[in-house]
Image (cartoon, grey):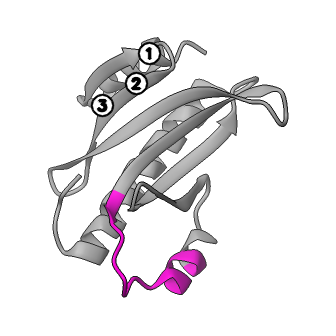
Amino acid sequence: MDLPAFMRKYADQIEGQYTEYDPSHSVIIVPVSGNRFQTVLGTIKKNDLYNRSLITLSSKVCALKPNMDFKMLLEQAAYFNYCRFVIADSYLMVEAVNALDGITENTVKEMLQEVANLADQYELKLTDSDIH
């Protein structure tokens, strides 16, 4: 899959915005409910353990807080189709990962939408504001 070409085309379809960093990293700003937007980073990288390329879509939710209810977040993640919560660089993030081989454009679209919608929902739930 040509990630930059796909992300550019999908951004046009949803009236979002697209930015390409390099052939393996693209950013799409996805419209979500309430006239808000969520930034999603798309990355393709090689997984050396399984010797295959993976597509990762991720979005920041909020900065980590000492009183964050991680048990609630883990319980909620059981209901997600593609996503999981991760911690990176002192941020709570939503991330979806899939093998690149055999993935369809429809699956990537579903992953993108789930990442954007969940990151937006939990950002509002945890911070009461629209930051990312």
Residue visible at 46% across and 45% down in the picture: 58
Q: Which residues are magenta?
A: 61-75
Q: Earlier in the sequence, mark 1 or mark 2?
A: 1
Residue at numbered disc 1 = 4
Mark 2 neighbour class, 10 Å CA radius: few under 14, some 14 to 19, many 20 or more: many
Mark 1 neighbour class, 10 Å CA radius: few under 14, some 14 to 19, many 20 or more: many
Is 74 a magenta residue? Answer: yes
Q: Earlier in the sequence, mark 3 or mark 2?
A: 3
In the rendered view of the protein, which quadrant contains the N terminus? Answer: top right
| Rendering coords of residue 118 (x, y %) | 41, 60
Type of amino acid under label 3:
Ile
Residue at numbered disc 3 = 14
**Does residue 12 appear anywhere in the picture?**
no
- Marks 1 and 3, how far apart at CA: 15 Å
- Marks 3 and 2, how far apart at CA: 16 Å
Residue at numbered disc 2 = 26
Type of amino acid under label 1:
Pro
Q: Label 2 near label 1: C-beta < 8 Å?
A: yes
Who is closer to the viewer here, 34 or 43? 43
**Does residue 64 appear anywhere in the picture?**
yes
40 horizontally vs 56: left or right: left
